[in-house]
């Protein structure tokens, strides 16, 4: 809810002479215009004009009631709490432990139900090093044969099976 502060100033009693303004009504209107423009330049909005009674002393012991014409202006009040605009909070900082757990959960959700052998070889971050994977012999991590003329274990079994069949 917007709160306002108010300022009450006396309406001008007399007009102000200005170039091109003629007659008492024009001078009075010009005085009122100058006052309202000055207040508007300071951020005040005109609200209304009021005629209010004021009791004043007259002579030594007498009192009389005088009616005063007042102009009421207002502007939005800036309290300390309202002066600060709300701001968005910074995003939370990345937490490595949670990131690793999230990566493992994603990997587990993508793996088929029966394939748990790869999960044993995954590190804490959910990544699997290629040379750590069981059963995958590539050219890089295959054991080097000392003698190229000797058959490998599978070739030897195939040759032995062929000899027994004949």
Image (tube, helix red, strand yellow):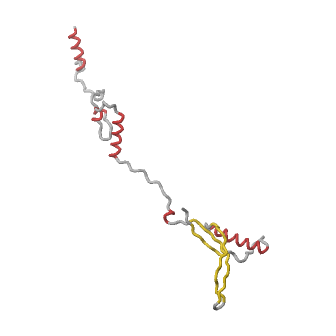
Quadrant location of residue 113?
Answer: top left
**Residue at horizontal 47%, vertical 54%?**
88
Quadrant location of residue 124?
Answer: top left
Position of residue 27 relative to residue 124, above or below, is below
Q: x%, y% of residue 166?
A: 22, 8
Give left or right: position of 88 versus 162.
Answer: right
Count every numbered label the image shows and give the total: 0
* In the image, farthest residue toward the right: 22
**Residue at horizontal 65%, vertical 76%?**
52
**Residue at horizontal 42%, vertical 50%?**
91
Q: x%, y% of residue 156?
A: 22, 17
* In the image, farthest residue toward the top: 166
Quadrant location of residue 69?
Answer: bottom right
157 and 84: which one is in front? Answer: 84
Give left or right: position of 22 versus 98.
Answer: right
Quadrant of the rendering where the N terminus is positioned: bottom right
Give left or right: position of 5 versus 65.
Answer: left
């Amino acid at each position: 809810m917007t709160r306002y502060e108010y300022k009450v100033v006396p309406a001008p009693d007399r007009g102000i002479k200005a170039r091109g303004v003629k007659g008492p009504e024009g001078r009075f209107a010009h005085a009122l215009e100058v006052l309202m423009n000055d207040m508007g330049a300071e951020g005040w909005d005109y609200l209304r004009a009021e005629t209010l009674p004021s009791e004043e002393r007259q002579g030594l012991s007498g009192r009389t009631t005088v009616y005063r014409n007042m102009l009421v202006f207002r502007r939005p009040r800036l309290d300390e709490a309202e002066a600060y605009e709300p701001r968005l909070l910074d995003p939370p900082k990345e937490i490595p432990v949670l990131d690793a757990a999230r990566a493992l959960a994603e990997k587990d959700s993508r793996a088929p139900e029966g394939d748990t052998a790869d999960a044993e070889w995954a590190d804490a971050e959910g990544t699997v090093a290629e040379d750590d994977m069981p059963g995958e012999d590539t050219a890089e991590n295959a054991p080097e044969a000392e003698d190229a003329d000797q058959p490998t274990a599978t070739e030897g079994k195939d040759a032995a099976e062929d000899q027994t069949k004949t």
